[in-house]
Amino acid sequence: MIQILLFYKNPILHTTLSLFLAFILVFFKIPILFLYAIHTYIHPDSLGQSSNGVRAAAASGLDGYQNLSSKTGAEIKKRNKAKEKVDFDENNAQIFRLKLDEGHLQSRLYCDQYCVAFTISFIALSCLLLHNYLNVSESSVGVWADGVFVPILVAILGLAMWFMLLWKITFERSASRRSEKQLSVVFGVVGVFLGLYIFSGGASLVLDFNFVSVDGFGRLFIASLSGCLAGFLFMPSAKSARSFWIGTDQLGCNLSMITCGWFSRMVLYVNQILIIFASLLWINPLAEIFVNSNYNNSKTASSVSSKFGAAEKLVGNVGLLQSDFSKFRLWCLLVSSLLQIVALRPSLQMYLNEALLSWYQRLHASKVPDLDYSRAKVFLHNHYLCLVALQFLAPPVLVLIFLGLSQIDGHSFKSFPLLCSMLPCSPFVKEVALFMAWWVTFLRAIFSSVFLVLHRHCFLYVS
């Protein structure tokens, strides 16, 4: 009995870890706690102007709601009743802030999908991390003995779940504009053709990837995945850019209830910089600067370098070894993904504060403001909170899963005949999975940077 347990210790450890994490995450409701105490905003119930519903709400505070009205109740009552009657009711110029708790979050759309995605992703990443610390050698007897099938299957399940969720939330009817959906389709088609061009070797001089052994159906399949990701990540990047724009107070509104604190602002800045930096590490002209290709030929390099200028002397003669640089790139992808998860709560708070900013702008836009648009915006941002949480969580989780799959040896996938019959196993594990991790980061960097530039030059604006 002990020998059997020792022989199958790896799958037993993976299964035990998965079940334990599933129990902990579900029992303690960790996905809900991750979003706990984020501030959201609602308008008071103003159905029936003759009733005193608004006044009662403002007076009682709605048990946990904080009144953010620009006019106090006393100031409103002191208005001269002899003035000409206008169509605008100042009682409607109020908004309430509350901290989200378990009951509020569970009533939001896509809350169940968010909890399931959070749980499966956490389990998949934990199994991939455990696999790196277990002693799995090529001499292991069968796929059942080394236990590698558990992290592979859970990771593939997680990827399939995320692709289906992203497809569903991208084309959710009221969650985004029709033009945004159309642009997502356009970028998806462009991503497919760009993927085919990359995998055919057209970008071999620019990108530091080798796809020689990937051909035929493999190229078409991976190019299709690349196109899907390009379409799916368009709208999350747009929302992330707006959250960054508001959180770092690029508008110059100087309103503490809308912008981030100093720590969250620093996280947003470092997160954006690190995403761009990590995506550039696979661009060959830039990657060559960080690699010391003449490490073993220092004497020859010193004699030849005298013929060139100072800039030419640096390229290839300073930096890291190729093996160290490869590890450095992986660490940059890992840290940037973890930092995106850290920045998820500030970004989500800024998404909700965008509705508050819209209400504030329209409240002070004229003497008789029209608050119908801001009411709808506050409702929709509040209603689709968990959907946006999924959009913000998807890119870093996808990068981490692909990065984990890239660290699994090719011989482990050979235990899956069906998969190896469709795709070459070793390149899929090492190059393709790593490329997909970089591709997600690259798309996030490109889209968010373009949106920030458009905001900076006033082609786009937050309202």
Image (cartoon, rainbow, N blue to C red):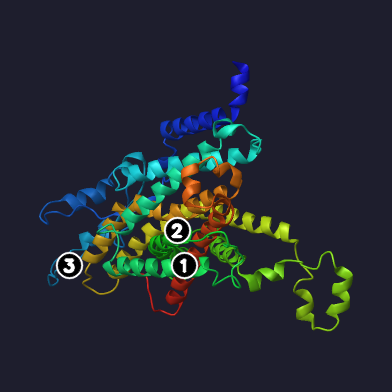
Dots 2, 1 in contact, CB < 8 A: no
Alpha carbon separation for disc pair 2 and 1: 11 Å
Label located before the other in sequence (1 or 3):
3
Q: Amino acid at mark 3?
A: Phe
Quadrant that contains the C terminus: bottom left
Residue on which disc 2 sits: 217
Q: Are marks 1 and 3 in contact (CB under 8 Å)?
A: no
Q: Quadrant of the N terminus?
A: top right
The amino acid sitting under disc 2 is Phe
Q: Position of residue 281 (x, y in %)?
A: 62, 65
- Which amino acid, mark 1? Leu
Mark 3 residue element: loop
Q: CA distance from mark 3 to mark 2?
A: 63 Å
Q: Earlier in the sequence, mark 3 or mark 2?
A: 3
Q: Residues within 10 Å of mark 1 (few under 14, many from 20)?
A: some
Q: In this rendering, does residue 64 appear at all? A: no
Q: Is residue 320 above or below residue 419?
A: below
Q: Which residue is mark 3?
A: 88
The x and y percentages for residue 455 are 43, 74
Task: Find out whether the residues at labels 3 and 2 contact each other: C-beta distance under 8 Å.
Answer: no
User: What x and y, as percent, mark residue 432?
Assistant: 54, 56
Q: Position of residue 45 (x, y in %)?
A: 20, 52
Circle 2 residues within 10 Å: few <14, some 14–19, many ≥20: few
Q: Is residue 284 above or below residue 42?
A: below
Q: Horizontally, is 44 left or right of 104 in the view?
A: left
Q: Nearer the viewer, residue 428 or 318?
A: 428
* Closer mark to the observer between disc 2 and disc 1: 2
Residue matched to label 1:
196
Left or right for 440, reference 282: left
